[in-house]
Image: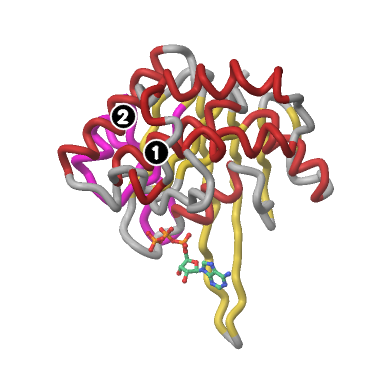
């Protein structure tokens, strides 16, 4: 059974009289432990697909099963539970809170989960170690480079122990050399068994993944 099973899925947006097919009859299977890049130009439907896979939105038509569970039929609170349990998001803009240190940024989602300080500490330290930032834990985002800020954002995601990491243009705000470091971290997390889904418009970045699916006008094609 695939981790992600999307079958003949469509998502439409209506703007006045026009219907935009952001996802048009898309089928995609992703297995546990894959590293897949979803590549396509601006407006092709990548973010729409990411929102569906990440349980931030549901399809209008078709099937989305995650780990064997039908997602289309779930209520918002159930979607939120699945996101919390299984999915980690990494965005182009690192979305760190400026008044919190690196440690506190990583810790915050664990506080929301109701964990005690004692439970949180090893998870935060382990996540910072996984991105080689244990020596920067007291730094605020403004005291960190762009690449380091993105590593804190990855650590924040990792502390929640997601099986899937959805990374939307994670290197988009970084120099290419620093971007390579971020991709290397994602590769390492993949080698440790996590499923990585990388969204990008850039072929050179997509080529770092083990598999590329290409998006165009709401439709997917596998690149061999
Ligand atoms: N909320 C919305 N309302 C109306 N149209 C939308 C909405 N969200 C997306 N669209 C349209 O759906 C299509 C796909 O958009 P999407 O954001 O998924 O593309 P994308 O590939 O992620 O683009 P980018 O790389 O620029 O972020 C586009 O034509 C877009 O204009």
Figure quadrant of the C terminus:
top left
> Residue furthest toward the left?
177
How packed is label 1: few (under 14 Cα within 10 Å), some, or many (20 or more)? many
Position of 96 compared to 181: left or right? right
Picture residue at 67% right of the left edge, 38% below the top = 83
81 and 108: which one is in front?
108
Where does label 1 land, which residue?
A: 198
Picture residue at 17% right of the left edge, 43% below the top = 176
Figure quadrant of the N terminus:
top right
Q: Are marks 1 and 2 in contact (CB under 8 Å)?
A: yes
Where does label 2 land, which residue?
A: 209
> Residue furthest toward the top?
192
Could you tell me which secondary element the residue under label 1 belongs to?
Answer: strand
Instruction: State the extent of the magenta-drawn residues as a range.
Output: 196-224
Residue 40 lies, in percent from the top left, at 33, 52
Q: Give the alpha-carbon distance from disc 1 to disc 2, as whole Å.
A: 8 Å
Could you tell me which secondary element the residue under label 2 belongs to?
Answer: loop
- 134, above or below 224, in the image: above
């Amino acid at each position: 059974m695939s981790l992600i099973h999307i079958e003949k899925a469509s998502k439409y947006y209506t703007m006045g009289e026009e219907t935009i097919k952001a996802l048009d009859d898309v089928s995609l299977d992703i297995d546990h432990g894959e590293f897949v890049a979803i590549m396509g130009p601006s407006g092709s439907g990548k973010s729409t697909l990411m929102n569906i896979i990440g349980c931030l939105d549901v399809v209008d038509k078709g099937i989305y099963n995650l780990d064997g569970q039908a997602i289309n039929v779930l209520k918002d609170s159930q979607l939120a539970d699945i996101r919390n349990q299984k999915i980690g998001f990494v965005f182009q803009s690192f979305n760190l809170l400026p008044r919190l240190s690196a440690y506190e940024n990583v810790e915050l989602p664990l506080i929301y989960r109701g964990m005690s300080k004692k439970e949180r500490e090893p998870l935060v330290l382990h996540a910072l170690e996984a991105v080689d930032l244990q020596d920067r834990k007291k730094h605020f985002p403004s005291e960190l480079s762009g690449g380091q800020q993105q590593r804190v954002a990855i650590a924040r995601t990792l502390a929640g122990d997601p099986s899937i990491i959805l990374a939307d243009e994670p290197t988009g705000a970084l120099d290419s050399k620093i971007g390579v470091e971020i991709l290397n971290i994602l590769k390492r997390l993949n080698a440790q068994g996590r499923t990585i889904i990388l969204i990008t418009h850039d072929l050179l970045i997509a080529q770092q993944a083990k598999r590329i699916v290409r998006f165009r006008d709401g439709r997917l094609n596998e690149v061999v």
